[in-house]
Amino acid sequence: MSDELRTRREFLRAGGCAIAAACAIGSLDLGALPVAAIAGEAAGAERRYTIPAADSVNIDHSEQIILVRYQGKVMGMSLGCPHEHAAVRWVEKDHRFQCTKHDSRYQQDGAHISGRSTRNLDRFAIRRDGDGVLLDFDHWFQSDKDPAGWAAAEVAV
């Protein structure tokens, strides 16, 4: 594994403690959001998630992943805003994600709408696996560096 991939993975795992603490003190107010907490299953270097039955926002706190089913597609995105890696939260009334630090806004599919961030939410490589999807945490796509890879990081359901 390259140093860049190792550093990214370590950052995501370390950031999980900060996000879990924020959830615990209520800054993300998960109780009031239409967000389901999920847990994936380890599958080698990947993690397996059951495909949500309907359009929804699902968060795996331990892996810092947002799994979204939206308009017949499933995407796995980083829970961290690309600007400074603060947690994003789902804003139900506006049907979008928003950074908890600088208020960057993102559509349901992770596309950047406005704010300090200069790109979309990072997406992880994803593939279909029966009634589930596999996310590869060693391979992610940044929309400014690999727009085609970012756009392709979804599966049809």
Image: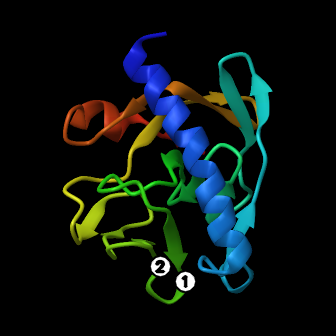
Dot 2 falls on a residue whose secondary structure is loop
Report the side of 42 relative to 14 (left or right).
right
Residue 88 screen position, x and y as percent: 48, 66
Viewer-closest of 118 and 149: 118
Whether tag 1 and tag 2 are in contact, CB under 8 A, the answer is yes
Residue drawn 43% across the image and 36% down it: 153
Q: Position of residue 91 (x, y in %)?
A: 50, 81
Q: Quadrant of the C terminus?
A: top right
Q: Tag 1's secondary structure?
A: helix
Q: How many marks?
A: 2
Q: Residue at x 49, y 62 (%)?
A: 87
Q: Residue at x 69, y 53 (%)?
A: 61
Q: Which mark is residue 64?
A: none
Front-lying residue, 85 or 131 = 85
**Which mark identifies residue 92?**
1
Amino acid type of the residue tagged 2 in the rendering:
His
| Residue lying at 26% horizontally and 42% vertically, measured from the top left | 143
The residue positioned farthest toward the top in the image shown: 1
Residue 11 in view (yes/no)? yes
Residue 96's place in the image compared with 129, above or below, is: below
Q: Amino acid at mark 1?
A: Glu
In the picture, measured across the screen, residue 72 lies left or right of residue 42, that is left
On screen, 137 above or below 155?
above
Assess disc 1: are there few (<14), some (14-19) or many (≥20) residues with their C-alpha within 10 Å of its C-alpha.
few
Residue 40 quadrant: top right
| Circle 2 residue | 95
